[in-house]
Image (spheres, rainbow, N blue to C red):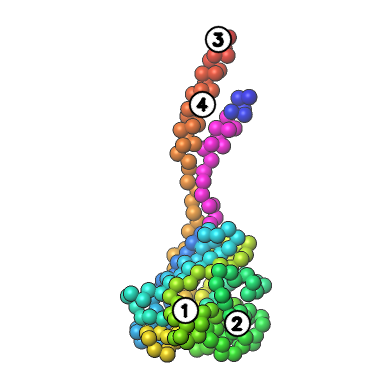
């Protein structure tokens, strides 16, 4: 019985936390802009995480239009160790023209042609996966925040995101567009979430050991 009590007390001091879960963030300084004019350089924030939704790697993209130019998110692209992704694996937003580089000879345009948000020609980069979202043109309104997930059993570290691409339209209130590339390797290392001890568990362990000692003394007197 004593072994059972001790095992229970040790279990009570177990740590909590998502060991291995990770989040990393790209900001504007991590992007190479294809337009040297600052008025055509949207201020990006891209948070990539494998801890927000179980079984997914999530992307939260924001354009800061308070301190930078207005823009409409139109397309996304990325390089990764993930293979075999299809449009069904991208969830949380409506996408168009999903293209894997294995499907086309052009790795900078969706479906190998200029196709709205998927056109990254001229960015100087090619990608494993590309897709567009939202409505093309000013009539569709500016989308400055977007979240979506990739359904995969891989962790963020296993996915090994190399570069990402963001295309915007209606940039700075004009008909201009941008095709900007962010390098994931240039930002801080991916940080695992460290397990956090349960304070109550430690107190329970001390209390329980005291009770256990008292039981032992009582048994000897008997």
Residue that numbered label 4 is attached to: 209
Residue 87 pos. (x, y %): 63, 75
Residue 143 pos. (x, y %): 45, 77
Q: Residue lying furthest front in this view?
A: 139
The residue range painted magenta reads 6-21
Q: Residue at x 56, y 65 (%)?
A: 57
Q: Earlier in the sequence, mark 2 or mark 4?
A: 2
Q: Earlier in the sequence, mark 1 or mark 3?
A: 1
> Does dot 4 land on a helix, a strand or a loop?
helix
Residue 82 pos. (x, y %): 62, 70
**Label 2 Cα crowd, 10 Å radius (few <14 / some 14-19 / many 20+):** some
Q: Which mark is residue 73?
A: 1
Figure quadrant of residue 218: top right
Residue 89, compared with residue 8, is above or below; it is below
Residue that numbered label 3 is attached to: 221
Residue that numbered label 2 is attached to: 97
**Label 4 Cα crowd, 10 Å radius (few <14 / some 14-19 / many 20+):** some
């Amino acid at each position: 019985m004593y072994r059972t009590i001790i095992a229970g007390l040790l279990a009570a001091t177990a740590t909590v936390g998502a060991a291995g879960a990770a989040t990393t963030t790209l900001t504007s300084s991590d992007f190479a802009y294809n337009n040297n004019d600052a008025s055509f350089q949207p201020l990006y924030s891209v948070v990539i995480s494998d801890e927000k939704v179980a079984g997914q790697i999530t992307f939260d993209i924001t354009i800061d239009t308070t301190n930078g130019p207005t823009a409409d998110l139109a397309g996304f692209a990325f390089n990764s160790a993930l293979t075999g992704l299809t449009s069904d694996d991208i969830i949380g937003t409506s996408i168009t023209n999903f293209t894997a580089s294995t499907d086309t000879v052009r790795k900078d345009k969706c479906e190998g042609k200029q196709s709205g948000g998927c056109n990254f020609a001229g960015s100087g980069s090619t990608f494993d996966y590309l897709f567009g979202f939202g409505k093309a043109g000013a009539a569709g309104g500016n989308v400055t925040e977007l979240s979506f997930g990739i359904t995969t059993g891989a962790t963020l570290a296993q996915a090994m995101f190399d570069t990402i691409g963001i295309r915007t339209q209606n940039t700075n209130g004009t008909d201009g567009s941008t095709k900007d590339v962010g390098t994931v390797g240039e930002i801080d290392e991916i940080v695992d979430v460290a397990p956090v001890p349960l304070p109550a568990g430690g107190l329970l362990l001390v209390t329980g050991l005291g009770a256990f000692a008292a039981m032992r003394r009582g048994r000897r007197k008997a």
